[in-house]
Amino acid sequence: MIKAGIIGATGYAGNELARLLLGHKEVEVAWYGSRSYIDQKYADVYQNFFKLVDAKCMDDNMAALADEVDVIFTATPQGLCASLVNEEILSKAKVIDLSADFRIKDVKKYEKWYGIEHKAPQFIDEAVYGLCEINREDIKKARLIANPGCYPTCSTLSIYPLLKEGLIDPNTIIIDAKSGTSGAGRGAKVPNLYCEVNENIKAYGVATHRHTPEIEDQLGYACGQEVLINFTPHLIPMNRGILVTAYASLKKEVSYEEVRAAYDKYYADETFIRVLDKDVCPQTKCVEGSNYVDVNFKIDLRTRRVIMMGAIDNLVKGAAGQAVQNMNLMFGFDEAEGLHQIPMLP
Amino acid sequence: MIKAGIIGATGYAGNELARLLLGHKEVEVAWYGSRSYIDQKYADVYQNFFKLVDAKCMDDNMAALADEVDVIFTATPQGLCASLVNEEILSKAKVIDLSADFRIKDVKKYEKWYGIEHKAPQFIDEAVYGLCEINREDIKKARLIANPGCYPTCSTLSIYPLLKEGLIDPNTIIIDAKSGTSGAGRGAKVPNLYCEVNENIKAYGVATHRHTPEIEDQLGYACGQEVLINFTPHLIPMNRGILVTAYASLKKEVSYEEVRAAYDKYYADETFIRVLDKDVCPQTKCVEGSNYVDVNFKIDLRTRRVIMMGAIDNLVKGAAGQAVQNMNLMFGFDEAEGLHQIPMLP
Amino acid sequence: MIKAGIIGATGYAGNELARLLLGHKEVEVAWYGSRSYIDQKYADVYQNFFKLVDAKCMDDNMAALADEVDVIFTATPQGLCASLVNEEILSKAKVIDLSADFRIKDVKKYEKWYGIEHKAPQFIDEAVYGLCEINREDIKKARLIANPGCYPTCSTLSIYPLLKEGLIDPNTIIIDAKSGTSGAGRGAKVPNLYCEVNENIKAYGVATHRHTPEIEDQLGYACGQEVLINFTPHLIPMNRGILVTAYASLKKEVSYEEVRAAYDKYYADETFIRVLDKDVCPQTKCVEGSNYVDVNFKIDLRTRRVIMMGAIDNLVKGAAGQAVQNMNLMFGFDEAEGLHQIPMLP
Amino acid sequence: MIKAGIIGATGYAGNELARLLLGHKEVEVAWYGSRSYIDQKYADVYQNFFKLVDAKCMDDNMAALADEVDVIFTATPQGLCASLVNEEILSKAKVIDLSADFRIKDVKKYEKWYGIEHKAPQFIDEAVYGLCEINREDIKKARLIANPGCYPTCSTLSIYPLLKEGLIDPNTIIIDAKSGTSGAGRGAKVPNLYCEVNENIKAYGVATHRHTPEIEDQLGYACGQEVLINFTPHLIPMNRGILVTAYASLKKEVSYEEVRAAYDKYYADETFIRVLDKDVCPQTKCVEGSNYVDVNFKIDLRTRRVIMMGAIDNLVKGAAGQAVQNMNLMFGFDEAEGLHQIPMLP
């Protein structure tokens, strides 16, 4: 039994971490950190935890926390983890950062897209990008995990096999993504009000969204060359779920079986990736509440393009679930421990 | 490890049973019965089960099923269970009926409200009404369980302590209930289409809904006299959840503490009933996906009435979850086994 | 052609006023007041008005405004209209106040329920309660209109004929109301975020909601005695719409025809009130975007109660539409001018 | 005052036609055709029309109808209009077909994508594709209008100026479209149930959707060469609205002003097309209930692509509104008559 602390426990990703860790056999949550709700009962902030969590919210003192727990999750805005982490903390506790601070290896690129100075560049090289299915072995040895973004997780896993196998042209990748509103966080802002989101759809961050360089980096590692993509996220009137629809030109004419074999090569043994049957489209509802990634593809012979699709729950595989999966790998637990939730339908 | 069969596995309640039983340590689902989808893969009907359930749908032969399993769940339309069950089946397997067939002890009342002839009246007396928190000891010994309706579960548990303790006048009870659309089932009907339900609210079955006599019976048992109520259900644009707002006149002036004590007397030790803190209203979202019942009340001194509120997930505590809870009691398992889901928010 | 000014034009009711007045043949909107968005283009605050409204937002200087326009609408928080209005303003322009400031004739009652001091009690007597179907003649002569609240409009109109005709017992009235989220306004608050409201239902303001005394006053006028009610509002995951389900004991046994005759007596000639056919339940979707009130009732002989139901669009008949209807009466326009919108479905 | 008949009046597009025509000064609806609801009151099928429409539903006898009305709208499944129309009918009444029967000039292409035989190929050449902003002059003279599909309307208008002006490469066009559920019609099918659509998003008809050749034809006319595109529609949990996000490679480096000038060249004088301000994204909510098309674009210099976006209400500009606009052109009415609805928000 290890002890875990959550910094940023009152955001939606923090709340989901609490939900998953409470059902985890090897972990006890010892610290619900929340700058905004210090000394309030956690179950008063999140009524779903009534009678399940008695703890009050604590501050975000990472140094103090490192003395008490084995693993620290930071589910906080960009910049906070980098401003708090140091060598002493990392020598005492493993850190899984759900923010973007350690995802991008090029500090200049990070600072340009995020518009803030990086306060701990010395740890960027050490940090392991926690996309479990791709970087499993490195994760097992890591002290500091950069937990992937929600869009990058879904995008990368949907495209990776075809890029890795050289079936698609890296210069032609277009990613059109759709996300439920929990991805926008729990901050009280007019555009996230019920009446603004409901019965509406819009794109946002067109050609400027911060997840773009993160996806480009991961796709670049897959094909061994620089990749520039178009990435357009959309806000969807639903709570949870990301659907990625990605387009790329095929390098040559391929059969369904060849493309399918590429997916199977990398994912056939993966617990959490489900390559659907031919012509079945991923649906966010069918992964809701679970750590699954549903992927599939369609070849369009007329245009010689392939359409790649992926669906995740943005709060699970796109945030808290993948963080738990990373923790499991780092501590030698069963990789699926605490992540056995079956997608809930309807 | 026991074996279970589900007749009606492709309705929403059947699907939820499958979700819960797959996570249950003591049960294996051996039979996914579905008249409409015989020989089709269950995971093709419910894509959330892809890679999780390999079985194909079977017919609804309850006699054959009783030879293979220890417990049979019937999540089927009214009348089917009564038309299939017999002494031989009950001698081989326990039956938990999620339909209304055995909920009402007066067969004439059943036939009047449901408009069908009862095919197995000889089992009505034996059948135990499976409201676990009220009838726990009888359930443990039962062969045949009448699993309560969704509205009756939420209504009865919200009102029971005050009626049992004689604090409210049984002749003044009004129940205004609101339900998510999964309660209407998976049948393809125009009124249940997305565009008809979304951005809309309406009452239905006003003064005629079939759950009325079931609620009246249970409230009658609680106070030892006949009870007639007004019960008005409403259809809400959400997938899951029932909220009950019930009104009754107080027999005398009472304090918050007295009423609270009545709830605590019956529910303080119950795992699945949460009496919320003063002035906190139950919310369906805060029980979603779980077996919890959240209840609370408000005294209105101006009108000398009390407002009683309760929230459940209609597919869990209102159907499949309570069925599993009943099974646990009948087979001597931990009452909460398979029901540890934490409410999912958002 | 008269000129109108809106104070509070950037709230949801203000936005709806703008929508309705833009289609009104006799009115030109000359002032879009908004303290929060002064000098910003109105169409930048509400993108639906792009290319339709060129004006910028103005301050809330009611005295200056009275010099420029014939009618002033205040769609502002409680207390603002009372703090701004004075004799000089009323001598120059008619005022239609969409807040609660002049709805309650007993200033002490207002101050108790709203928790603020009333700044212009001298105008309370003069103000006419703008429920058009009940107070039409007084409205025609008024300088100052207290535009009714959304819940009181729907509640009063649903119950009025039966109370006026003495068919129901005033001491037994219970009103269970359900509202779309636009009723909560455009303020950026966590409980109104999409993810908090969606897939959720809860009661709020139980036994304490400020619309209670307003409804009680109106029902009291109808039956000529003091009325105390239970009023419980609920927040529904939809943008627009209020549904009222009201319960009362019948004074004597009555037939469908007798009750129907009571409704017809008051509403048969009303353009905006539709008494539905027998057994058809009002639905909010069927009045959406329009000024209609759909009402109906059901007699329950078992309990000797009647269930009265009403549906409105909270932003139209519950706010801006009724305000326009009041303006039409005050200025001698056709009562339905600018209010010919047909309910939009789906 | 002309008379109009609607065949297929009880589908969602037919219902919307009725809503728009009821507010039209020059038209009276004389025939509500509906094979499924013959002899039932139209207002019983669509409760929003209670007290507004007294008519009963009629059959779909187009020949009889042509004797009674000046214009016939067919809002019916593919194939019906072609099977009914003939020279005699066209000599008596103008026909506006909201189905796909006369949209595609190559009958073989139509039969391949729709899988049915075309029953009236002799009228295909004569039929005018009713995209009003592009084909206005031909529409004015037409007897038979092929009213454009919802996706093709939004897609074509979003892309047209750039293609026409030669700014983008026709071989690189990818259209990712998102639609509200009313586009799926009012047929009672499991995939369109509330619980299946709500809290879910999925692509459908990937690489095979029937609107693909229609869009390709229109884009081909704009650039004077054959165009093949990728078109991927998605089902969104909302009632109304289509958002198109389209991608294409720029032929050369261009400035914002150059692209903006292309849009202005074609749309500056159009009543119903609104080219939004720089960096403002179209939102379906901001056109809901109206005939507007909101378009905008974003240049991505990194990838040398342009992202084009468009939003419409699928039932208005995507169906009934455009049909009325076509009728207005054909009969010499003001083009905007009956179409002055202001988008409703929220």
Image (tube, coloured by chain):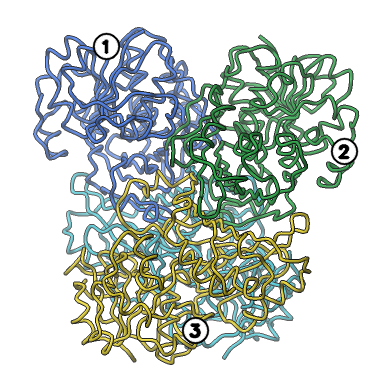
Chain colours: A yellow, B cyan, C blue, D green
The verdict on a common chain for dots 3 and 1 is no
Along the line of sight, the residue nearer the viewer: A239 or C169: A239
Marks 3 and 1, how far apart at CA = 69 Å
Marks 2 and 3, how far apart at CA = 55 Å
Res D224 seen here: yes
Question: Which residue in the structure is indicated by mark 1?
Answer: C70
Secondary structure beneath dot 1 equals loop
* Residue type at numbered disc 1: Asp
Q: Nearer the viewer, mark 2 or mark 1?
A: 2
* Residue type at numbered disc 2: Val
Q: Chain of mark 3?
A: A
Secondary structure beneath dot 3 equals loop
Residue at the image point whose x is 35% and y is 86% from the top: A143
Question: Which residue in the structure is indicated by mark 3?
Answer: A336
Q: Position of residue D238 (x, y in %)?
A: 53, 46
CB under 8 Å between callouts 3 and 1? Answer: no
Occupied quadrant, residue D279: top left
Question: Which residue in the structure is indicated by mark 2?
Answer: D107
Name the residue furthest front.
Answer: D252
Residue at the image point whose x is 56% and y is 36% from the top: D312
Q: Chain of mark 1?
A: C
